[in-house]
Amino acid sequence: MPGDKIFLDTNVLIYAYDVSAEKKHEMAKTILMDLWSSGRGILSIQVLQEFFVNITKKVSKPLGVKIAKDIIRDLLKWDVVIIDGESLLEAVEIHIRHQYSFWDSMILKAAQKGGAVLLLSEDLMHGQTIDGVTIKNPFTDNTLF
């Protein structure tokens, strides 16, 4: 899998910047640094939007808006997937077939559209493969990828 693209879900990204998340913070920070150095990371606009809202308002030690904006500016250097109308309809199909929430289905579609083989997420079913993308909860496994 070296060189394969890895999609990062919002929760992992939030943990990387949420110092109050303790152990998950350290693990997510390591994942983020590895993806930065390898150039294998993929995000979507949805993930960046969710990150901004959550990291500035919903974590126990929120970041300032300017800091969050600067982080997003840096993350825009990654491959960032923008969902078009056809992809939105395909996300609805994922929602119907696999019973994920619409928003999680959008994440899955973005990962697939971006060419990721792995989706790191705490929220989705660990080990499941959907449309060529395998879901992995990085906090339940001792290996990064």
Image: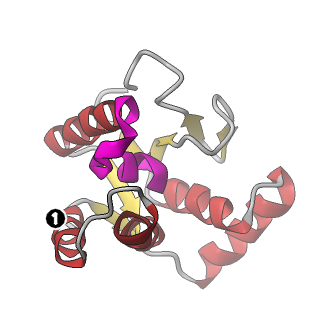
In the displayed structure image, the side of residue 136 where residue 131 appears, left or right: right
Image: 4 above or below 67: above
Q: Position of residue 137 (x, y in %)?
A: 54, 33
The question of residue 10 being in magenta is answered with yes
Element assignment for label 1:
helix
The question of residue 21 being in magenta is answered with yes
Residue at 69 percent across and 37 percent down: it is 125
**Label 1: how many Cα within 10 Å (few below 14, some 14–19, many 20+):** few
Q: How is the image coloured?
A: secondary structure
Q: Where on the picture, by quarter, is residue 105?
A: bottom right
Q: Main secondary structure of the magenta part?
A: helix
Question: Which quadrant holds the C terminus?
Answer: top left
- Residue 44 visible in the current orientation: yes
Image: 85 above or below 8: below
Residue under numbered circle 1: 74
Q: Position of residue 77 (x, y in %)?
A: 18, 64
The range drawn in magenta is 7-24
Number of numbered discs overlaid on the protein picture: 1
Question: Which quadrant holds the N terminus?
Answer: top left
Q: Position of residue 35 (x, y in %)?
A: 25, 41
Q: Position of residue 20 (x, y in %)?
A: 34, 44
Q: Which of the two residues, 129 or 69, is positioned nearer the viewer here?
A: 69
Q: Which of the two residues, 21 or 95, is positioned nearer the viewer here?
A: 21
Residue at 32 percent across and 63 percent down: it is 62
